[in-house]
Amino acid sequence: MTEFALDTQTALFIIVGFALAWIAFGVWLGRKNKSHEDFALAGRNVGYAFAAATAMATWVTSNTTLVAPQLTYQLGVWGMVGYSFAALGLLLFAPMAKRIKQILPQGYTSGDFIRLRYGRFAWAVFLVISVVYAFGWLVSLGMAGGILLEALSGLDYYIGMTIILAMCVGYTLFGGLRAVIATDFIQALIIILGVAVVAYWLIDNVGLTSIHTELSHAHPQLLDLLFPAAVMFLFNNIFFGLGEIFHSNVWWSRALSFRKNVAYKAYLTGGLLWLPIPIVTGFIALAAPQLGIFPASADMIGPAVASSVLGKTGAILVFIVVFSALASSLDSLLAASSDLVTQDIYHKLIKKNASDQQLMRFNRYCILSLGVMTWLLCLPRVATLGALLNFAGAFVASTIWPIVIGLYWRRLQGIFAGIAMAAGTIVGLVAYFWIGFYVAALVSCAVSGLICAIGVVFNKSQFSWHQLQENEQ
Amino acid sequence: MIISEMAFFLLVTGALILTVLAPVVLIGLFIKDYFSKSIW
Amino acid sequence: MTSFQVWLKCYNKALLALLFILISCSAMAQSEDTVVLSGPTEEVRAGYFVVELQQISPALRPLSLQVSDTNSFTNVLQTVPIMGDFNQVTLTGFESGDYYIRAVHQQRVVSQAAIKVTVEHYPIWQALTLFVLGALLFLLLLLTLIMGHKKAVRHD
């Protein structure tokens, strides 16, 4: 019989308690939502504190608490340092967020921009990329929720997965982006304090010297600064992160929801605050061999170390941290993806003269349907669905150049942007399967960049920025 | 080329200190926004 | 489908089921005090890999793996305890070389045979080439972004 870090009843008590509290909080925040703009973009008036916290907390996904330790366990010091370079995504998005706010003052989604800037073909390619990424992420988060809660407490996969999804759908449904951002603020504080406590305990009780000695003796590769696989992974991971942030509506809708002049500094602050976190969570994994902890699968290493060193308190702490990390990303993705469907598909294709109330109602149905679809896809517990996110790098990295060039320059036409995204994705996928995971995003970004460069060189017509103001009509 | 113990120490403790500073910064910003009525 | 075909299908199924039961019984009889290990069959390129353990009887818990660089296990590099009642473990941090792994319960070797895992890291030139290409592409992106940002600020 497996001994779980936390007994099932306590686990159930914690997650039901949290779920009810977050939903009540969502309902309370939702009372201010009078229009669709309020609901989808928190009234476009989010202040600096919440803006910086939401930028940071959303990027602290379950990946930061689970994958950063996993990569460190596999790739050593470069794994954690390399993972922390994903902060570049937030930092480089800072000037872009300012530009987005400037050229799309009334915009709603990243899809809006692509459609208005590049036309239908590029928009269709972009939507495919967005859907693959969003579903890959949603399903992997839902599944990770169920699997982790089960691994930590023995709580049935279906119960854990259902509660976490229902909770996120619940408060996003009632509170909209306001609830997502406010819960992100609190979740960010919980996550940071949780990982800091575990890391401090390890430094204080196990000691950095003994960890270094043990690793250099029995696992030298983990401390090797010229670890080939880790060196290869570095830039690929950076491009993956850049692609994720640059294309995803999660980040665009935030930029659009922030108060004027806040977007730039909020993303910059969020990025700088996020930067050290993967090093701290990754370090937890490096202490594992010294403690005699060798996980069944590498993604369990973070929770396994934390709950083994801190006992029941640690288990509760890990449980809450992981639960918060999962929720802070799931809610953002639900809100941003349903905005994309409401605005880009319903409002632009199906019902162009929809009223504000109709849009708000449709957006809510969307959140609910996305939640149900994610739940259905998580039901069979097929690992391959969660693995969709692994090769999402090939998809998202292809959008980097078209978005950067499209935001600042007028000489790239839609046809080239569309081909760049499609070809980048296809070649990136081929590279993923033929060469390895460590080149997918890199190749995708390079191919897409090359096609964009050809497009800029051979195109003589100039895009008129006024065409972006469609929403004001 | 193995990372030296000193570099390892600086990397981990530096990251931990910066991580602990994050909630202080966030709460400080929140208080500032709260008093200037610019949370939302 | 004719009735003969249906009969033949049922017969095949029954035969397969019987065969499966027989194999399971013989495996169970064998597995009372031994464990079957399996590891990566191809070269490991990044220094970490998963070792799976099959047919572990509860009597053999707690179970550990011993890792050595010789088949005779004269020099045991690591002793790795298996967590809880999991049937696999992820080992990490290996340099290039051949490694031998066996299972141990209370200082008694319980694996039927030691397995051999070969770790062969990617050549460093390959890693550095990708690193440099990635760095150049990143630099280009950074310059484009800075130029764009400056242009936008000028026009603001």
Image: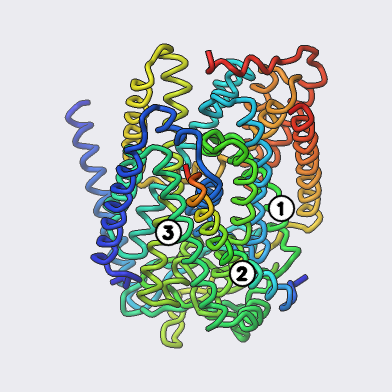
Q: Residue at x 69, y 25 (%)?
A: A406
What is the chain letter for disc 2? B
Answer above or below: position of A329 versus A278: above
Q: Mark 1 and mark 3, same subunit?
A: yes
Left or right, residue A346 beside residue A201: left
**Tag on residue A110?**
none
Secondary structure beneath dot 3 equals helix
Answer above or below: position of B33 versus C75: above
Q: Position of residue C120 (x, y in %)?
A: 69, 62
Task: Give the CA separation, mark 2 to mark 3.
Answer: 21 Å
Q: Residue at x 58, y 60 (%)?
A: A278
Where residue A410 sits, quadrant-wise, is top right
Q: Position of residue A222 (x, y in %)?
A: 65, 69
> Label 1 crowding class (10 Å Cα cut-off): few <14, some 14-19, many 20+?
many
Front-most of residues A27 and C62:
A27
Pointer 1 with pointer 3, Cβ within 8 A: no
Mark 2 vs mark 3: give the one in front: 2
Q: Earlier in the sequence, mark 1 or mark 3?
A: 1
Q: Position of residue A191 (x, y in %)?
A: 47, 60
Give the amino acid at mark 3: Val
Left or right, residue A198 beside residue A361: right
Task: Give the CA separation, mark 1 to mark 3.
Answer: 29 Å
Residue identified by numbered label 1: A232
Where residue A77 sits, quadrant-wise, is bottom right
Q: Residue at x 43, y 38 (%)?
A: A177
What is the chain letter for disc 3? A
Residue identified by numbered label 2: B17
Residue identified by numbered label 3: A322
Q: Position of residue A337 (x, y in %)?
A: 45, 33
- Residue A379 visible to an observer of this rendering: no
Mark 1 vs mark 2: give the one in front: 2
